Image: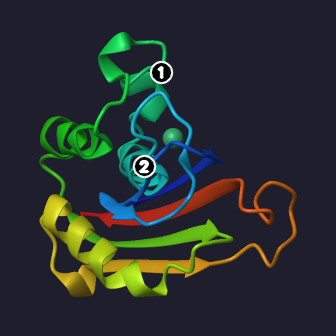
Amino acid sequence: MRIGTGWDLHRLVSARTLILGGVVIPSDKGEAAHSDGDVLIHAIIDALLGSLAKGDIGSHFPDTDPAYKDADSIQLLKKVLTEDLPPHRIENIDTTIILQRPKLRPYIEAIRESLANVLGLELHQVSVKAKTAEGILGELGSGDAVIAQASVLIS
Ligand code: MG
């Protein structure tokens, strides 16, 4: 067994799509990023690479590389799953999203299903939790940033 943790932060700006775990969330702001900015997928990629002691998302997919401009983060995750993870397999994943608004409760099951689908897991192996920033912590509390954390156990 090996464990890994991942963490990511993105600024939220207008005229961008808010995408979390491959699910588009209705919102007036989305993640500013070189890629599609899916902060949850980025945290999961870092957790997986961390569990393997294989560096981080920036070393695998540099944001200075034009190849990753507006990249679909799910495709980056699939690359890690096929090229880096074997012969290991994922036992479970636990994640937390910190977002002031919109409230994510209506979307949690869709995000879990999306993650289970891409990770090749059953729903009981995929946990997605969400909380607000209680209106504090600067940009996070004012709804101008989003954070995601992920922990993964592989065997
Ligand atoms: Mg990121």
The residue where tag 2 is placed is: 38
* Quarter location, residue 68: top left
Q: Is residue 134 above or below residue 152?
A: below
Note whether residue 55 is visible: no
N-terminal-most mark, 1 or 2: 2
Q: How crowded is mark 1: few (under 14 residues within 10 Å), some or many (20 or more)?
A: some
Q: Quadrant of the C terminus?
A: bottom left
Judging by the rendered image, the residue that carries numbered circle 1 is 63
Q: Mark 2: is the Cβ under 8 angstroms from ligand 1?
A: yes
Q: Does dot 1 land on a helix, a strand or a loop?
A: loop
Which of the image's four quarters has the N terminus?
bottom left
Tell me which amino acid carries mark 1.
Asp
From this view, report whether residue 123 is shown above or below residue 47.
below
Residue 56: image location, x then y, percent: 46, 35
Residue 88 appears anywhere in the view: yes
Determine whether, in the image, residue 45 is placed left or right of residue 145. Answer: left
